[in-house]
Image (cartoon, rainbow, N blue to C red):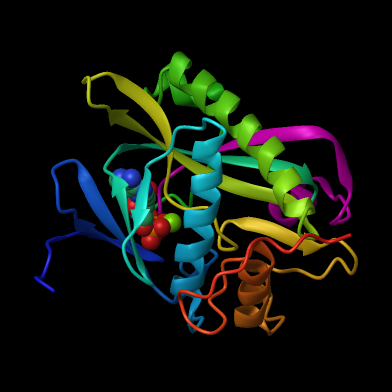
Amino acid sequence: MARRRKLYEGKAKIMYEGPEPGTIIQYFKDDATAFNNQKQGVITGKGVLNNRISEYLMTKLTEIGVPNHFIRRVNMREQLVHEVEILPVKLVVRNVAAGSLAKRFGLEEGTQLPRSIIEYYYKSDELNDPMISEEHITCFGWAATQDLDDMVTLSLRVNDFLVGLFLGVGLRLIDFKLEFGRWYNEHDEVQIVLADEISPDNCRLWDVATNEKMDKDRFRRDLGGVKEAYQEVARRLGVLPEAGPMDLKGPKAVQ
Ligand SMILES: Nc1ncnc2c1ncn2[C@@H]1O[C@H](COP(=O)(O)OP(=O)(O)O)[C@@H](O)[C@H]1O
Ligand SMILES: [Mg+2]
């Protein structure tokens, strides 16, 4: 394959120039990091699984009309996406107390929140992704009020949809992180779309029956069985290639 120009190498993915202007190739690595790069490791096969899982979830979101960057999967580790101007604000949607929220407010992990909440973090490795408020976002021009409105509306739709989708395969969606970008569509109109990836790297997923963690917390907390957990998520969603990439089953509903 002709060597493409590398645009950016992040912690979990590499972005290459795409075949047409305005497109990029997302290459999913097996590298895992946590606590802003302080902990590093490799989860063999993670890139292949996250590529599949994110493809599946983005495709479903397209079907319900949530605009996103996904175009198509290219191979085991790569997908073609629209290039967007990433907004430097990460949105975290929480349904159940866990991680930093549980720690900050002294809540027991697993406490159901009375309603879903959204938190904002400034995307900056140097500053350790500090938590921010709407005031900071609009004051520093990281996103316009209308953009922020769109991101919140989309995040809540994504949450409602994904909570149901995961519940159908026996997983509780505890919380997750989303990134959005500005996309100039075919008519040169600017639109806020969902970008990056949705995978066990940035979702907390717990088994409904056992509360077992099925996400990157297994890596963060040295719980073992990290690869197996990612595989199980893929298997339940029906996107784990069992006898090869062509052998894909549909989602396996849990009674
Ligand atoms: N469609 C897109 N267009 C441009 N940049 C994107 C797109 N989707 C994701 N990105 C950015 O590419 C990078 C993905 O690589 P990743 O390894 O996750 O990086 P990071 O270490 O910054 O989290 C992220 O910085 C993300 O914001
Ligand atoms: Mg990332």
Residue at 88% in and 45% down: 112
Report if residue 120 lies within the magenta region: yes
Viewport quadrant of the C terminus: bottom right
Which portion, as a residue range, is magenta? 98-125
Residue at 50% in and 56% down: 54
Q: Is residue 41 above or below residue 187?
A: below
Residue found at the very far left of the displayed protein: 2
Q: Residue 237 vs residue 55: left or right? A: right
Residue 132 in the image: x percent, y percent?
Answer: 55, 34
Q: Is residue 242 visible?
A: yes
Q: Is residue 142 visible?
A: no
Residue 179 in the image: x percent, y percent?
Answer: 46, 42
Residue at 72% in and 81% down: 223
Q: Is residue 97 above or below residue 217?
A: above
Query: Could you say which quadrant of the image residue 133 lies in?
Result: top right
Residue 170 in the image: x percent, y percent?
Answer: 81, 60
Q: Is residue 175 above or below residue 249?
A: above
Report if residue 10 lies within the magenta region: no
User: How many numbered badges does the structure rendering display?
Assistant: 0
Q: Residue 85 vs residue 143: left or right? A: left
Query: 99 or 95: which is nearer to us?
Result: 95
